[in-house]
Image (cartoon, grey):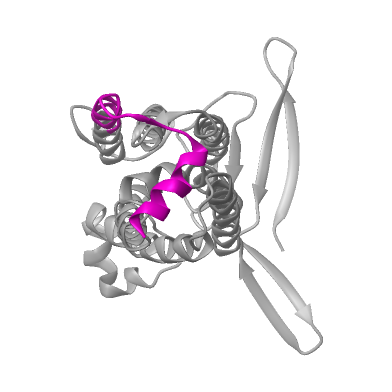
């Protein structure tokens, strides 16, 4: 099982400063003669997909759309995992040179933007195939994507897979001595920062989707907000800097935010649509 301890010591100002040591890479189940080890990263990834499917299904129902939202999320999630792994391999060529093709099957090492690209592509194609419209489908999927991403980050936190931040002396700094990539130094718990950002962004986009809006505006806001959030959190993550003092994720985040701004500007030229108008549009397309 994992290990949880909470320690504190007095700072020079006489206040208690807590040091958290929390990690649970695997949940071990002993069922009579059968021993099962469930990786928490995979478990939370599954839970993230379930949450995203639920949110998108609710959004479809709110918009009067009868298409299979759960099936769309399943396909997008599968291709997203493939894209995330491929992006990670491209982003870390040294790891590929050391371990070869084995890195493709490793349960660790996924990059969000690789998953975003293939996931978006899958949703656009499915939305076009279901006669909803690719951009309209992305609008409906945006809250689900933000919430699912936030929940998925809990898996990174529990497993201690190295997605944490740089050393810190802040009271909420955490160490991961028994993580997949252990560290004894107290670091920024960046997965928790991203969890909070994902839930807040998802809540905002859900609220926006309940108001009249122009097609493309919601996904544009999603790209801007998630891009800005990831750009900022990268300042306290331990990813290497590759250009202009920025990490690869920050460059991708900047591109995401700029694409979102362009999409919002384009959407401003389109007529407004409300949640109840999607069903009429689908009926006409059919």
Seen in the image, is 69 located left or right of residue 10? left
- Residue 97: x and y, percent? 21, 65
- Residue 69: x and y, percent? 50, 59
Give the magenta-colored segment's residue range: 260-286
Hey, which residue is sitting farthest front in the picture?
A: 284
246 versus 156 height, above or below: above
- Residue 1: x and y, percent? 72, 64
Nearest the eye: 8 or 135: 135
- Residue 55: x and y, percent? 58, 49
69 versus 245 height, above or below: below
Nearest the eye: 19 or 54: 54
Nearest the eye: 31 or 168: 31
Quarter of the figure that contains the C terminus: bottom left
271 in the magenta segment: yes
Hey, which residue is sitting farthest bottom in the picture?
A: 33
69 versus 33 height, above or below: above
Instruction: Name the residue rendered at 42%, 29% in the picture.
Output: 213
């Amino acid at each position: 099982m994992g290990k949880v301890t909470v320690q504190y010591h007095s700072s020079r100002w006489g206040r208690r400063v807590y040091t958290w040591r929390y990690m649970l890479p695997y949940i071990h189940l002993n069922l009579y003669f059968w021993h099962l080890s469930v990786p928490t990263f995979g478990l939370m990834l599954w839970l993230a997909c379930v949450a995203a499917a639920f949110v998108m299904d609710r959004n479809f129902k709110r918009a009067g759309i009868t298409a299979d939202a759960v099936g769309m999320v399943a396909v997008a999630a599968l291709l997203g995992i493939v894209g995330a792994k491929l992006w990670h391999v491209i982003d870390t060529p040294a790891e590929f040179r050391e371990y070869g093709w084995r890195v493709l099957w490793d349960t660790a090492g996924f990059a969000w933007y690789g998953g975003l690209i293939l996931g978006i592509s899958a949703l656009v194609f499915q939305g076009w195939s279901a006669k909803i419209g690719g951009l309209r489908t992305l609008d409906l999927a945006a809250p689900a994507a933000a919430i699912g991403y936030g929940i998925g980050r809990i898996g990174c936190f529990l497993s201690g897979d190295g997605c944490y931040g740089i050393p810190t002396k802040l009271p909420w700094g955490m160490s991961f001595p028994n993580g997949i990539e252990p560290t004894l130094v107290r670091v920024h718990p960046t997965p928790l920062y991203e969890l909070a950002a994902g839930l807040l962004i998802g809540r905002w986009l859900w609220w926006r989707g309940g108001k009249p809006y122009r097609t493309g505006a919601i996904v544009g806001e999603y790209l801007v907000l998630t891009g800005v959030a990831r750009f900022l959190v990268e300042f306290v993550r331990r990813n290497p800097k590759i250009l202009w003092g920025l990490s690869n994720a920050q460059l991708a985040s900047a591109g995401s935010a700029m694409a979102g701004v362009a999409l919002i500007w384009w959407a401003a030229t389109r007529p407004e649509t409300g949640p109840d108008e999607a069903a009429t549009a689908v009926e006409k397309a059919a």
